[in-house]
Image (cartoon, rainbow, N blue to C red):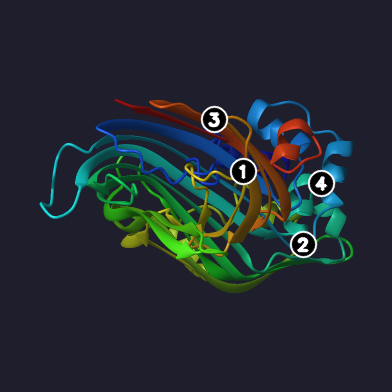
Amino acid sequence: MKQRKNHILAFIGALIVSQTVSAQLLPVQYDTLPRSQEIIVSGGVDYAGSALQNQLFSKFIFGGLITSDIKDASDARHKGLNRVGGFLSSEIEYRNYNIKLFKKRDWGMTFKAGTMAFGGGIYSDDAYGLIFYGNDRYVGDTMEMSGMDLTFSSVQKIGVGFIDNKSKSSMSFNLYNMNNYMSGSFRDFEIAQSEDGHDVTLTMDGELSMRDSKSFSKGVGIGMDVDFKLPVAWGNDQEAYIQILAKNIGMAYLYEPQKYYRIDTVIEFSGVEFEDVIGDNAIVVDSIDVLASLGVSSENRKRAVLLPGYIQVGKIVDRHSPKKLQSFFGIRLFPSIIYSPYAYAGLHYKTTDWLSLGANISYGGFTNFRGGFYASADFNKISVGLASENVVGLVSKKGSGQSLFIRFRCAF
């Protein structure tokens, strides 16, 4: 059981570490200044859990001993179903407004390259208990892990598109390389043990799909990025600007076959130890005969999947407004049930002509309520922004996750 537990911990740790290197919330201000060319570099990470604390997260990322106190602190925060996950992205974009695509419109061209990863899961409190405390906690009881859902995908992209010189609204069409994909869904997942621990009943109904190749490229995709900024009436003869942002919206085809497992079974084991049922030498052995006898079908599949994209709609900050204080708010959606709709609202304060500060509150995503903060320095040719959607997580070991984004723009 100990070795099996270490494998599970290693998998979760790898998932979290893979997220730790897109400034989504960092306000991209409405800027109508004419430009000739621009280079924008952005990137960041956001990972969180609805129940896991940073003192546990950090052990997966940096290593170290997971003590009983650390396990217990996160255990006390768990509910029936819990979320954990993260996303990262980095992108470089070159804009050239001197290239006129359409004679009647002042459209330039944009070229970009970047990477995006998204992953996480929904799991039960019993799943946490089994991983960190072992099966002894559930002798004479049933471990209820139904509703578990897992996903992870990562892509690299290159794209070309067009951009409006005034509003900076843009659209690009992208080509993607998908280098990793995994998904799993379990409608039913229960493990019941007798009072003496020698009788085990396993009930499972679900699917699991994972890579069956170590090659860097497992699929190709096409998609698009859209960034529209629309003026709307706001108060006493004033205007505000709504941003409709969509990133990496499209499909990828996995031409490298994936190992696909379909599980629909109820199995009763009598006179065995728990480790004999789910240990390294038990049902996880991918033998067609063994799996078939246990109600598990296994095959290689090529398939089409969604890119790890998102949509965000919200009110943005007007850089040219004479107001010292402006509001911003919006909602973000990933096409995955592990990421709940993420809503945020905050205030932007212009301290000087070049320095702005902002703060916000948010709810959703991989966790519940969070507070964010950002600082933005805007000069004529250069601007730099630094932001976090989770200030408590940055400074407290009892916070939930980490969040840090950066954006650099240079015009010339």
In the rendered image, is residue 355 in sight? yes
Q: How far apart are marks 2 and 4 (CA)?
A: 34 Å
Mark 4 neighbour class, 10 Å CA radius: few under 14, some 14 to 19, many 20 or more: some
Residue 65 sits in quarter: top right
Q: Is mark 2 on a helix, strand or loop?
A: loop
Q: What residue type is labelled 4?
A: Ser
Q: Who comes first in sequence, dot 2 or dot 1?
A: 1
* Front-most of residues 87 and 383: 383
Identify the image quadrant of the C terminus.
Answer: top left
- Asked whether the residues under the numbered discs 3 and 4 touch, taking CB atoms below 8 Å apart as contact, a structural biologist would say no
Q: Is residue 330 left or right of residue 258?
A: right
List the residue tagged with mark 3: 353
List the residue tagged with mark 2: 271
Residue 385, percent across and down?
Answer: 53, 32
Considering only vertical position in the picture, is 198 above or below 214?
A: below
Residue at (81%, 39%) from the top-left corner? 398
Q: In this view, does 287 lie to the left or right of 204?
A: left
* Front-most of residues 195 and 166: 166
Label drawn at residue 47 = 1
List the residue tagged with mark 4: 74
